[in-house]
Image: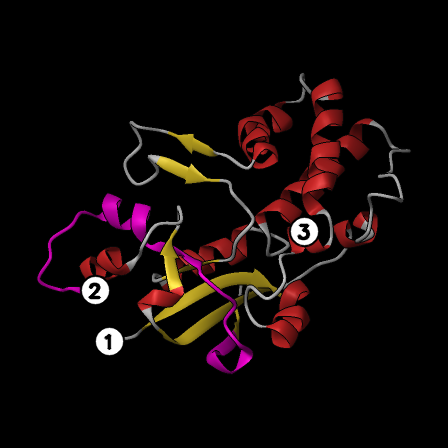
């Protein structure tokens, strides 16, 4: 049995997704976003350690830079947070995908964090700019651009087209989530409802919806 899955993003990435499918391009590699993030993180570490806004995102920014996991064993539903961005992720829960699209201003966790750091650094150093050899996306222009969140619904997705969020086989998790006779708590569901695409999903199996906020 197949089930719908959802991906939250912004209109900024729509043309690319329509052209190459969901997961057809990894923007972190295609546009060098990780290199830009590492550059801004280094500058932030040198200049913003007394900035409360930066300190609130410092730990997660470091995890993004290192492409690692964060563990919170005493936080139900968020025991492990995944900051590996080499893959495309979907959720079997529509509201989680919508929340991601709404809360990640630019439809990508890495790009949203880049803009956040860029704005913090610009507040500290008004004449700051990212070196041209790194700035393939024109960060200053994007930072001033308003984008709209988008929900993508994936249809006819088989379990073998998905991995768990952490890269393992997904069949057991999917069967457990959608088996109405199985009892599980909400914290377990939140921790296991996101999946990694094993390969790109072509445009014909995607539907797009604007999210009103």
**Which quarter of the figure has residue 195?**
bottom left
- The residue furthest left is 181
- As measured in the structure, the alpha-carbon distance from the residue carrying label 2 to the one carrying label 3 is 34 Å
Residue located beneath label 1 in the image: 1
- As measured in the structure, the alpha-carbon distance from the residue carrying label 3 to the one carrying label 1 is 34 Å
Q: What is the magenta range?
A: 179-208
Image spot of residue 119 (x, y percent): 74, 38
Image spot of residue 146 (x, y percent): 71, 59
Image spot of residue 144 (x, y percent): 78, 52
Relative to 153, is 63 on the left or the right? right
**The N terminus lies in quadrant:** bottom left
The residue carrying pointer 1 sits among few (fewer than 14), some (14 to 19) or many (20 or more) residues within 10 Å by Cα, namely few
Relative to 10, is 129 on the left or the right? right
Q: Within the magenta stretch, is there residue 205? A: yes
Image spot of residue 99 (x, y percent): 46, 55
The residue carrying pointer 2 sits among few (fewer than 14), some (14 to 19) or many (20 or more) residues within 10 Å by Cα, namely few
Mark 2–mark 1 contact, CB under 8 Å?
yes
Q: Is residue 66 above or below residue 189?
A: above
- The residue furthest bottom is 204
Q: Is residue 171 above or below residue 77?
A: below
Relative to 153, is 52 on the left or the right? right
Residue displayed at 72% across by 26% down: 42
Residue located beneath label 3 in the image: 29
**Dot 3: element:** helix
Residue located beneath label 2 in the image: 178
Residue displayed at 59% across by 27% down: 58
Marks 3 and 1, the one that precedes in the sequence: 1
């Amino acid at each position: 049995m197949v089930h719908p899955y959802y991906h939250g993003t912004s209109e900024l990435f729509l043309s690319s997704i329509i052209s190459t499918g969901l997961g057809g391009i990894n923007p972190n590699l295609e546009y060098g976003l990780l290199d830009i993030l590492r550059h801004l993180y280094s500058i932030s570490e040198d200049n913003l350690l007394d900035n409360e806004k930066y300190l609130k995102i410092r730990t997660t920014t470091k995890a993004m830079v290192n492409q690692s996991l964060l563990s919170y064993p005493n936080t139900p539903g968020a025991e492990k947070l995944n900051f590996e961005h080499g893959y495309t992720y979907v959720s079997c829960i529509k509201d989680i995908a919508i929340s991601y699209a709404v809360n990640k201003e630019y439809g990508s966790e890495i790009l949203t964090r880049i803009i956040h750091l860029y704005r913090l650094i610009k507040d500290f150093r008004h004449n700051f700019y990212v070196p041209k050899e790194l700035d393939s996306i024109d960060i200053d222009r994007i930072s001033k651009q308003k984008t709209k969140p988008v929900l993508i619904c994936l249809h006819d997705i088989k379990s073998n087209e998905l991995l768990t969020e952490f890269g393992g086989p997904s069949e057991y998790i999917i069967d457990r989530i959608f088996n109405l006779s199985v009892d599980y708590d909400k914290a377990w569901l939140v921790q296991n409802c996101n999946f990694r695409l094993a390969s790109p999903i072509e445009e014909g199996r995607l539907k797009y919806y604007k999210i009103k906020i």
